[in-house]
Image (cartoon, grey):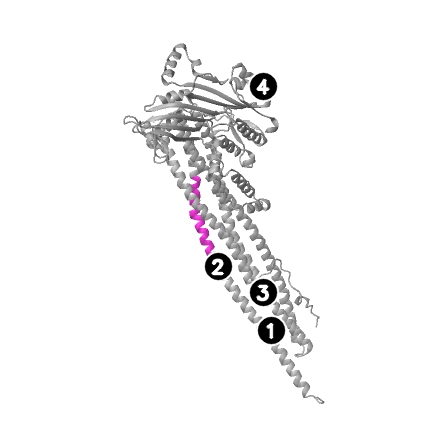
């Protein structure tokens, strides 16, 4: 029982590792613990759904029906295939359970029968019973809520939430507060039906497209659309999670390489909003956009910011194994940030 | 005159099992047939499921082929984007979608998730076939136990009948040599009657065990053919499902990689690759489902017809057995009456003889 890197397929693909047996079980347990400790608020993907979705992936749930669990080495999270597998299994669970029949009879057959399929059917019954009705994290879903309406000004205020497993292998939640003014010359991106606010496909496409950008760039892109006034864009990200031996670049990768065991999980929060008093960067691993621009570019950038009236805030919380707490605090100190660092002790896992 | 050993007339052949009668044999066959009917019913359900799968898969393959054709440009007339927009209208929830690189990624994801669901359904279908096959093999085992038991009991009955028949012939030969009406003659006659009675009883048993063996063997043959055909189907579907799953694994990696591709031409290339792999995966599953459909159409219907013929033949044989059994029973009763009447006559003669004797 071990982890093994994926064979190169010759086609463009992502780097993966497949975990099996006790390593796989331990990974799932640790991830669930990490997510519990992270206490993700409403700006992040649903933490409970993430935990339940992940819980369905371990051998304790699938009873050995699957050979292992494929991990995206870039994010340290299961690959798109694995999230989809659970989504499919949960969707079919009720129907498949009905087809499998009485569990007592399955148990009797598994015990007395000579055929392996009877044993497999019993395991399937246990698996589908364990996962049915589980709350799963959406792999790509947009929801819109109406906050208020000004009929005289033809303006409505909405909150748009997009949850997505991004191309980087990380889960992201974009929360966008915006106002839309309806007029004869613009095409509305949001619609108000009798009892619900709905997004249009062009808006869905736009936000889906921006999901790989940070909050500030998304703010700027959306604010450039006709009839839209953006108040706030928040991007909460789950991951990356780095484990020993996984590799990885940047300060987190160096931290892992130096200490050789344990794990570090990051939960960045990135916000561009009009109601922030000042820019603030509390993320030891990411700089504000302004710092990466040339003198010339920065002047133009500042003008745009002034016109749109927004400020930027970046933060990142961590969940680490006990051995990495102090090294991580040192890293944050060096970057002059004060971050929440939660520790998962060995016996807690 | 040699003393004959008549112990066999007091013996009982040792049949194994619970004994047999026309009614119990009917019960055995009808419960085996009932189990077989349940299996046939389950297969009919599988056929229905297969039709649903086939319809869904055909629809998916149609969409994928069109998408792939347009992406490669072979089906394009009004330019790539306008054609993709037309295709997108096939996917629920994606109408009026403005096409961008991200929406292509979303389109592929949606298609991948539908394909995963279809392949999973096909895999579950294969497990149901495997279960049905295992249950049929268990049924064959059960039938084999009954067939072997019936065959052994048939042998036991035949051996016993031959022994009784041989004894009867000797008893009848001896009887001719005895003085009619003498005590020895009466005793020999009683043994002959007993032998006849045993012959009648156990020839019925022989016939029933023979019928059981033959009917159950036929039933087993149908079950075996059914199990083997399902086994072949299972092997086929397992191959297809494995191949389709591998393709889907490949495409899941490609879909995630598409999001990281920087330029549009690379995205298009990745998309084309993913679509081709998805189409191939769906094709493999559809091919199986289609072949299964042909099997169901030809074999299952034929099997149901065969079983109807089996039921008709079984009914005819059972009727015959019952008639034979009744006939033998009547003979036995007639023989018993004959013996009883003969005994009464002898008693009367004896009484008349004693009243006319001097000093009576």
* Chain of the residue under label 1: B
Please state which of residues A187 and A201 is positioned toward the viewer in this rendering.
A187
Q: Nearer the viewer, mark 4 or mark 1?
A: 4
Q: CA distance from mark 3 to mark 2?
A: 22 Å
Mark 2, residue position: B313
Check if residue A249 falls in the magenta segment.
no
The answer to whether the residue labelled 4 contacts the one labelled 1, judged by CB atoms less than 8 Å apart, is no
Q: Which residue is mark 1?
A: B336
**Mark 4 Cα-neighbour bin, 10 Å: few <14, some 14–19, many ≥20:** few
Q: Chain of mark 3?
A: B
Q: Residue furthest bottom?
A: B358
Q: Magenta stretch mostly in which secondary structure? A: helix
Please say whether residue B74 is visible from this viewpoint: no
Q: What is the magenta range? A: B287-314
Asked if labels 2 and 1 share a chain, the reply is yes
CB-based contact (under 8 Å), mark 2 and mark 1: no
* Lateral position of residue A344 relative to residue A194, left or right: right
Q: CA distance from mark 4 to mark 1?
A: 107 Å
Asked whether residue B311 is drawn in magenta, I would say: yes
**Residue that mark 4 sits on:** A326
Q: Left or right: where does residue A107 sit relative to residue B59? A: right
Distance of mark 3 from mark 1, alpha carbons? 17 Å
């Amino acid at each position: 029982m071990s982890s093994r890197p994926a064979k190169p397929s010759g086609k463009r693909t992502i780097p993966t590792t497949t975990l099996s047996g006790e390593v796989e079980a331990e990974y799932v347990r640790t991830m669930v613990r990490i997510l519990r400790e992270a206490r993700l608020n409403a700006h992040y993907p649903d933490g409970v759904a993430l935990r339940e979705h992940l819980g369905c992936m371990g051998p304790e749930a699938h009873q050995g029906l699957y050979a292992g669990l494929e991990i995206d080495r870039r994010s340290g999270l299961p690959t798109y295939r694995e999230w989809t597998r659970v989504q499919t299994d949960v969707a079919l669970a009720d129907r498949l359970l009905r087809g499998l029949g009485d569990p007592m009879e399955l148990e009797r057959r598994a015990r007395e029968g000579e055929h392996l399929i009877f044993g497999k059917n019993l395991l399937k019954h246990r698996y589908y019973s364990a996962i049915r009705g589980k709350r799963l994290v959406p792999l790509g879903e947009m929801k819109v809520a109406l906050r208020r309406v000004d009929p005289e000004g033809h303006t409505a205020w909405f909150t748009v939430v997009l949850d997505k497993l991004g191309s980087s292998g990380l889960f992201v939640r974009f929360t966008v507060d915006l106002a839309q003014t309806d007029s004869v010359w613009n095409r509305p991106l949001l619609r108000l039906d009798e009892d619900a606010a709905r997004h249009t496909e062009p808006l869905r496409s736009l936000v889906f497209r921006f999901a790989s950008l940070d909050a500030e760039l998304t703010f700027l892109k959306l604010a450039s659309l006709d009839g839209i006034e953006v108040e706030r864009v928040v991007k909460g990200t789950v991951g990356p999670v780095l484990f020993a031996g996984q590799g990885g670049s940047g300060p987190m990768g160096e931290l892992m390489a130096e200490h050789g065991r344990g794990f570090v999980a990051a939960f960045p929060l990135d916000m561009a909003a009009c109601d922030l008093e000042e820019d603030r960067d509390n993320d030891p691993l990411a700089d504000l956009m302004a710092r990466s621009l040339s003198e010339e570019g920065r002047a133009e950038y500042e003008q745009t910011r002034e016109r749109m009236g927004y400020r930027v805030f970046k933060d990142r919380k961590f969940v680490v194994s006990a051995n990495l707490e102090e090294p991580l605090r040192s890293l944050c100190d060096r970057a002059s940030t004060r971050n929440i660092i939660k520790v998962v002790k060995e016996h807690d896992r | 005159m040699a003393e004959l050993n008549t112990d066999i007339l007091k013996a009982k052949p040792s049949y194994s099992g619970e004994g047999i009668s026309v009614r119990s044999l009917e019960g055995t066959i009808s419960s085996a047939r009932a189990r077989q009917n349940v299996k046939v019913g389950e297969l009919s359900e599988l056929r229905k499921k297969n039709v649903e799968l086939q319809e869904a898969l055909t629809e998916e393959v149609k969409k994928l082929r069109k998408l792939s054709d347009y992406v490669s440009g072979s089906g394009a007339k009004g330019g790539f984007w306008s054609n993709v927009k037309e295709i997108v209208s096939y996917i629920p929830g994606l109408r009026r979608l403005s096409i961008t690189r991200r929406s292509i990624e979303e389109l592929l994801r949606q298609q991948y998730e539908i394909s995963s669901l279809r392949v999973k359904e096909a895999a579950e279908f294969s497990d149901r076939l495997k279960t049905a096959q295992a249950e049929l093999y268990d049924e064959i085992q059960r039938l084999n136990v009954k067939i072997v038991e019936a065959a052994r009991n048939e042998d036991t009955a035949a051996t016993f009948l031959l022994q009784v028949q041989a004894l009867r012939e000797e008893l009848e030969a001896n009887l001719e040599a005895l003085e009619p009406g003498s005590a020895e003659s009466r005793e020999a006659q009683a043994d002959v009657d007993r032998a006849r009675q045993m012959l009648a009883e156990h020839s019925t048993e022989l016939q029933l065990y023979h019928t059981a063996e033959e009917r159950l063997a036929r039933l087993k043959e149908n079950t075996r053919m059914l199990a083997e055909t399902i086994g072949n189907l299972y092997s086929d579907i397992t191959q297809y499902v494995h191949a389709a799953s591998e393709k889907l694994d490949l495409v899941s990696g490609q879909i995630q990689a598409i999001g990281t591709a920087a330029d549009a031409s690379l995205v298009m290339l990745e998309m084309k690759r993913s679509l081709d792999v998805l189409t191939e995966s769906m094709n493999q599953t559809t091919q199986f489902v289609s072949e299964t459909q042909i099997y169901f159409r030809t074999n299952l219907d034929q099997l149901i017809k065969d079983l109807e013929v089996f039921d008709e033949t079984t009914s005819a044989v059972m009727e015959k057995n019952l008639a034979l059994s009744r006939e033998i029973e009547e003979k036995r009763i007639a023989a018993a009456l004959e013996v009883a009447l003969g005994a009464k006559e002898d008693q009367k003669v004896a009484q008349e003889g004693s009243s006319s004797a001097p000093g009576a």
